[in-house]
Each structure stands twice: as structure tokens, then as C-alpha cells.
Image: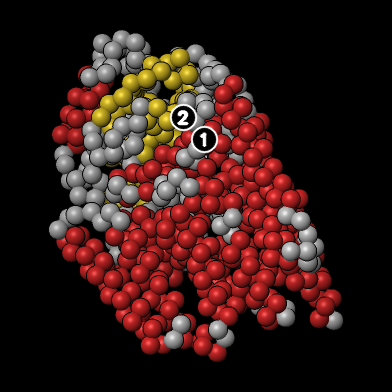
Amino acid sequence: MKNNIRIPFIIILALVAGWFGFDMLRRSQAEQLWGYRPLFCFLAGWGAIVLLRAYRYAKWPQRWRWLALSTLSGLLLGVGFPGILPLPWLMFFAFVPLLVVEREVAEARQGPARGEVMRFAYHAFVLWNIISTYWVANTAFVAGIFAIWVNALLMCIPFVLYHQARQVMPRLGYLAFIAYWIVFEYLHQRWELTWPWLTLGNSFAEFPSWVQWYEYTGVFGGSLWILGANLLVLRLWDTWRGKAAPLQRPALRLLGLVAIPIAASLLIYSRYQEQGPIRQVVVVQPNFEPHYEKFDIPERVQMDRFLELSGQAVDEDTDYLLFPETSFGFVETGNINSYAAVQRIRQFFRDYPLLHVVAGVDAYHVFRPGEPRSRAVRESVRAPGDTMYYEVLNAAIQLSMGSEETPLYRKSKLVPGPEIFPYPGFFFFLKPLVDRLEGTIAGVGTQPERSVLSSQAGKVAPAICYESIFGEYVTGYIRKGAQAIFIMTNDGWWDNTAGHRQHLYFASLRAIETRRDIARSANTGISAFINQRGDILQPARYGEAAVIKGPVRFNEAFTFYARWGDIIGRIALFAAIILLLNTVAKGIGHRA
């Protein structure tokens, strides 16, 4: 692309990004939501940056081809992810253009070219992250930028490691691609900067009938499926271009890899029978917009709506009433029953002694003298010589109308940034900046193990928001005896974009993995019931106050995945360690 053509494109893209950025600022000042504006702002801004940096391509025209191929990969990965368009089959070949780039770069450089490969991989992964997760910026603009560009950078690590492995171990190179990528996803669920949203196995969340076998493998089975299909498509492409071998064999392999799991899944789906006794559950969706409404409206007014909606559906046959995340609070953990909202709930439902209300709450725990303090400890000086030490909690409680006992669960998979400051010992130098912004590095208190909310009606898993996207984490509730899963969330931070739909679809995967019914209460939507096959039932409309009522089966059977968790991730980790050691050893041998 010549400069006289490229420069006008850069100017146009920069103007588009600037206009959307200005419009978002204007809407913020008018207390209006952004919707899809971050998507267009980020895409235009990134396009301008990429074209601006492409001035060196005149010396190496082949880079324009690599840029086009990596762009194609990024677009396919983004569009193939759920919540955008219902096209998950794109993921079966979305990596292929980028794999072609990696190979052509190595051939052109006649050896490893980590920097060059990383440059094009980063471009593809930024596009994927923008298209799939642009909505994070609706919560906080800087957080959206960090989530997209840092996560894309982390994705480059397994791809560059694969590139290096393929140079010294050509026969095992593609195995390294699978192992390193799955290990990246596996570890990305287990550190404080965790962000497993784009785990490849999540791609089929909108089509639960395709992946009923997740009850054995979890989402990493889907990741393995996608990665294997991409390698077979690459082999088919090579065979077609080389014309030296018949296409039938690679085509049949690809067809078998894609079709057999789907056929098996559809068979399981058609034959699966729901298990467990039925409990009647009412789910409330109060619909308080979180940016400008929920935290400004008096709590008593909000509770009026909760009780009004609940009263429309609760009767003497209702076993559970479910409210969303942070329905009310600041509740002190040692004195829950004296809190005004709790007293109103107990009074309103006094005629239903068998009813159990499960609600997400803002809470805090005051540390007693001598009690061990968590890393989330904060302090408040009440008087000279009188300092209160406490921790803030994102929690869930269960109010049983026939009992004063009020069990509490603490959310423990925390969102990096707003709920946990990752690795404060390493990033200690940021504390003055956080303090200046009136924030805190203390984060939110947690609990070391999953726990369930028990009653005579059964045992439920109280999964709060972010926790519901972690497959193996959710199995911890099942091993504690949970017979059903209650998800409490507030997805209104993302406006009416792909984010809340993706979060809902991911819940279907948890239902399949554990074969547990799910009741889902979302502040602004989408509230729904999900059966053990992953079917979404009675979804409420986003952005509307609603109440839904339905049967929830309380299942006690264990799936293979609930017992054993992410075996595929652990096998991949072992394989990756062996491959990495071999890569290093052979690399040293080649240099010697």
C-alpha cells in the first residue's frame, strides 16, 4: 500500500476513533451509556496505529500479505466467539491464516523470528480481544484498554513458544501449539490477573447441544477440539496448494474430527433425562442501572421493588427466592439479622416458614482482637486509640423464614482491579497512585474453600458473578454437596452489548459440566433458568424489571468432570514442560 493511499486511511481512522472517544466523553457528562461505541473507537484507533507503523513495509512488501492474513485471523476469532454472531464454526479455521504467517515468516528469515511473529500475532489477538470484549470499557475505559491489550500480549506467549519449538522440533511443533495454548488457558484461570473469558472452549456456549461431552472434559475439551481442527485445516490447505497428494484423506480426517463430537453430543442431548427432585424457585430481576441509578436510589426504595416483584410470584409452594448480586448492604457479618432490609424481608414473608431467600449483598467483617487478619484488611480510626480493622466482602446470604440462622458465603474468584489488586508485593510502587485516586489495594475478602447454602430444601452453590465462568472452580461447590447452582450477578455495567449475553451463555456450560440446574438472577438481565442439558429457559428481557418462576431439579449425581476437573489442562501442562525442556536443550545444542 503506497503512502499516498495509506495516509488518508490513517487520517480517516484517527478521526473516527477521536469522534467516538469524544462522543463517549460527552455521554458520560450527560450520564448516558456508551453501548457499542468502544468497539468502533478501539477498532478505528488500532487500525490507525497499525497502518502508521507499516511505513517500513515498503522495504519488505510481503509484510502486507502477513498483515492481511493476521487481520483475517483476528476477525475470524472475534466474530466466531459467542455474543457477536452465531458462527462458532469459524473457530475451526480461525487460527489458520496466522499459522500460515508464522511459517512464511520463518521461511523468509530462514530460522526463528520471534519478534516478527509476535508482531503479527499481537495484531491478530488485539483484534480478537476488541471484537469479543470491547464491552469491558463500558465499566471503566482504562480497564477496557488494559484488558484488551495486555490480554493480547499474554496470548502471544504460547504462540511465540510454539514458533520457537517448531524451529528446533519440526515434528513436534504443532503438538507444541496445542499444549502451549491450553496451558496458557489453564494457568490464566489460576493467577491473580485471571481473565479466562476468551478460553476457546467457551466458543460453543451458545450451542450447548454441540458440547454435551463437556460433562467429561470441561471447556478444555472444546479448546483441544478447536486447536486440532485448525491444524487439520492447515494440513488440508497445504495438500490443496501442493497438489501432490489426494485431498480425500485430510478432508475425511477433518470431517471426522468436527462431525463425530457433534453427532455424539446430539445423541447425548436427545437421550439425557433430567435428574433430581423438583424445587420451586422464584428469580427477581429488579433492573437498577448500576452506573447512574442503583447506588444513588435509597435502599428502602429499591427494596420496595424487590418485594413488589417477589410478591407477584412467591406462594406457599415456593422453596427459594433468588435476588441478584449486591442487592443491598453494607451488612455487618456479625449482625445480619438486625439490618433493616433483612428485617423487611423476614417480615414480608413471615407467612411462608419454608421459604429460603438467597441474595447477594455488600458486607463487611470486623476483625476481633487477636483474630487473624486477611490481606484485604482495612482500618478505620473511630477515636484516638480506637482503630477498627475490617474487610469488605462481596457476599451471598441465605435467609430461612423458619430460622434465625443466616449462613454467609464470600465471593472468592475476584475481578482483577475492582475486587483484587494483583500481587501488591510486586506492584507496591503503585500504592501512592492508588491512594491518590482514592482507591485501595486491600481488595475484597475471600474464603479459602467453596461452601454451599444448606437447608431442609437442599444445598445450593452460591456463585457470584465472575465465579460462574470458572469450570473447575464451580465443581468445588459440587464436591461440597451442591445439588443446584444459583448465580447472582450484575451485568448492567456493560450496557446492552455482547458482554451480558456471553456471561449468560457461559452458564450453560457450567450446567453441562456438572449436570446441575441453574437459577440465574441478574440485576438488569438476563435472568433465566438453565436445565441440566444447558438449555436457557424463561429468559427475562434485558433492561426490564421482571420476576420468573420455575422448577429447579436438585441433582446429586456426579459427572466425570465434577470429580476430576481439568485433566486436559494438567496433561497439557506436563506435555508443555517436556516440550519446553526439549526446545531449550536442542536450541543450546544447535548453537554449540
Q: Where is residue 568 in the image (x, y as percent from the top left)?
A: 68, 45
On screen, residue 544 above or below 276: below
Residue extending farthest to the bottom is 59
Question: The C terminus lies in which quarter of the figure?
Answer: bottom right
Q: Position of residue 311 (x, y in %)?
A: 22, 19
Disc 2: which residue: 535
Could you classify mark 2 by the number of other residues whose Cα lies within 10 Å: few (under 14), some (14-19), or many (20 or more)?
many
Disc 1: which residue: 208
State whether residue 476 appears in this view: no
Q: Tag on residue 191?
A: none
Q: Do the residues labelled 2 and 1 touch (CB within 8 Å)?
A: yes
Hey, what amino acid is under mark 2? Answer: Asp
Q: What element carries label 2?
A: loop
On screen, residue 517 above or below 73: above
Hey, what amino acid is under mark 1? Answer: Pro
Could you classify mark 1 by the number of other residues whose Cα lies within 10 Å: few (under 14), some (14-19), or many (20 or more)?
many
Q: Position of residue 466 (x, y in %)?
A: 44, 44
In which image quadrant can residue 560 be found?
A: top right
Q: In this view, does 589 lie to the left or right of 158?
A: right
C-alpha gap between disc 2 and disc 1: 7 Å
Q: What element carries label 1?
A: helix
Q: Position of residue 354 (x, y in %)?
A: 36, 12
Q: Residue at x 41, y 50 (%)?
A: 84
Q: Residue at x 72, y 47 (%)?
A: 253
In which image quadrant can residue 329 be found?
A: top left
Q: Which residue is drawn at 70% across and 77% down?
A: 107
On screen, residue 492 above or below 61: above
Instruction: Specify which label sits upstream in the sequence, 2 or 1.
Output: 1
Q: In this view, does 176 lie to the left or right of 475?
A: right
Nearest the viewer among 13 and 523 is 13
Q: In this view, does 474 lie to the left or right of 441?
A: right
